[in-house]
Image (tube, helix red, strand yellow):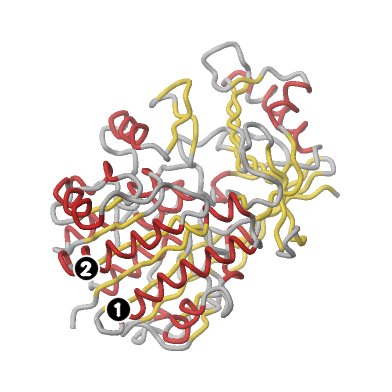
Amino acid sequence: MNPKFVVVGFDGLRADLVTERNTPNLMRLAERGVRFANQRSVFPTETRVNMTAISTGANAGRHGVVGNRYLDPKIDPEVPFNTFLRTMIDRGQIAYDGRLVEATSLGEMLHRGGKRMAVVASGSEGTSMMKMHDVRQLSGNLTVSCHYPGITTPDAVATEVAARFGPPPDIRHPDTAIVKYATDVFLDYVWPEHSPDVTILWFDEPDTSLHYLGLGTKETQATIQYCDAQFGRILDWAAAHPEVQVIAMSDHGHVAMTWGASVPQFLREAGFSVGDHLQGDADLAILPGHTGKLHARPEHRRTVLRDAVHAMMEQPWCGMMLAKAGIEIEGTLPQSLAFVEHPRSPDIYYTMRTDGGLGRDDLPGRTWYDTTGNALAPGAGQHGGLQKEEVNGFLIAAGSLFRQGVVSEVFSGIPDLHPTILHGLGLAPADSATGRPLLEALTDGPERPASPGIEEFTSAWGRYRQSLRRVKVAGATYLDHGYAETL
C-alpha cells in the first residue's frame, strides 16, 4: 500500500482553541494519531511566510520571503512588496529570475520523485501561490485557488472546477461558504480525478473571523465549529482510504489587539525624518505593523537608526527589536537568532509589545497594535510576533504511518512538514530544508529523540529588556517564544 498525504490547514487556529467543544473532529483525529503539544511557527508569524515554510521546509532566512509585506528595492524602490497579490509575486519572480523563493519546494521534490501534488486553497492569491510557487513548471501538479480562479493552474483545471462547482462564493466575514466550496472541490474533483500523492487543502478560516470578529466571540467560535464540521467530511472520507495519512494544522496563532499607538507618528513627533521608502529625503523608512520594519540610509545606521531604536525602547508599546548583521545597537538581538537574517530583511524588525494577560474574551494573549492604517477593532486577533499564543499553532497527524493516541511533548515546527511527508513517501528532503522528519511520531521511529537543548538569549538597554527562548531537537531549532519588558 503506497501512502498518500492530505494536509488540512485551519489558518490562524490557536492550539488552545482545539477543544472537544470547538473541534470534536480534530479531537477525533488526535485520538487516532499524534497531537504535537509544542508545535511552533517560524518568524515572522505571518501567513505567507509560514506558507512558504510549509512548502520548502525552511525558515524565512533560508527561503527568502521575509514578511507578508516588506520593502525590496530590487522589486520596487518605493512600493512595499506584498505577497497577498499575484501581480506582486509575478514581479518578484521576474526581479529574481524565478528565484523569489530561494529554497526548493515540496512540489519540486515530489516531482523529482515521480509523485504529484495538489493545492486547494480558499485564501488570498498569495496564500494559494506560496504553497507551490513553481506549480507552472511542474507538470502533473495542480493548484486550485477557490476565491481567485485566475490563479488556478493548469487552465484546464480552472475550466473544470468552474463547470462543476460554479463561481466561488463572495468573500465575507465570516468566510465559511468558501470553506465548504474548497472541501467540495477536493472530495468531488481533485481526489477522484487526480488522486495526488500529497494534497494541501487550506481553509482561510478561522483566521478571517479571528481578525474581524475577535478571538473568543460566539461568531468566531461558530466559524471554528463550521470548519471542523467540514474537516469531519474529510475524516469520514479518509475512513474508506486506509492509504491516506491525514495531517491537520495551523500556520500561527493570534493575540488580542488591546492598546493602540502609532509608531510612525511617534517617530516623527520625536524629531526623526521618516518616510515610506528611502527614495526621497527621509533618513528612515518604516513599514508599520504588528511586526514592523525599519530601514535606514547606510550613513545613518550608527547614528539616526540607533537613536530611533533607543527612543522606541523607552515606549510601553515596544516589543522585540532584531537587528541585521553589521548593525550593532545596544539592546537589540541579532536577526540570525530568529532565523530571519536575509539580504531582503530590514535593518530592524520590531514587534508590538505583547503579554500573556487575559483579553476581553478571557483568553490569554494581549498586544499593543499600530493604529496607522488599521482597519481592525480592539479585541480583534493579530499575529506576526513571538508571543507564545502567536507561535503556538496546532499539529495533529494520523494514519497507518503514525502512532495512535499519543500526545507528543517533543517540539515540532512548520518546516518539519516537508521532510516528514517526503520521509513517509520514501524520498529525501530538499538540501535547503531546515526542518526535520518527525520520526518520533511514526510507528517505526524512536519513541523520543535525544533530550532537547534549551537556549536563552537576552539583551537590555536602559530599562528595556528582551528575551528569546529556543529549543533544539535532533538538529532542528525552534523558536519557543520571545518577549520584551520594561524593568
Q: Residue at x 23, y 73 (%)?
A: 426
As drawn, is 170 to the left or to the right of 412? left
Which residue: 47% across, 54% down? 175
Residue in the picture at 55% in, 37% down: 325
The residues bearing labels 1 and 2 have C-alpha atoms spaced at a distance of: 11 Å
Name the quadrant containing residue 399: bottom left
Asked whether 474 or 142 is in front, the reply is 142
> Which residue, as the protein is rendered here, is positioned at the far top?
281
Q: Is residue 21 above or below residue 60?
A: below
Query: Whole-percent x and y of residue 365?
Result: 70, 59
User: Which badge, 1 or 2, is on the more N-terminal residue?
Assistant: 2
| Spot occupied by residue 269 in the image (x, y as percentages of width and height) | 78, 21
Tell me the quarter of the picture where residue 180 sits: bottom left
Q: Does 60 appear above or below 405?
A: above
Q: Amino acid at mark 2?
A: Trp
Out of 340 and 18, give the one closest to the viewer: 18
Q: Residues within 10 Å of mark 2 (few under 14, many from 20)?
A: some
The quadrant of the rendering that contains the N terminus is bottom left
Between 165 and 467, the residue placed more toward the observer is 165
Q: Of helix, strand and loop, which one carries label 1?
A: helix
Q: Are marks 1 and 2 in contact (CB under 8 Å)?
A: yes
As drawn, is 156 to the left or to the right of 260? left
Q: Which residue is mark 1?
A: 237
Question: Label 2 belongs to which residue?
Answer: 191
Secondary structure of the residue carrying numbered label 2: helix
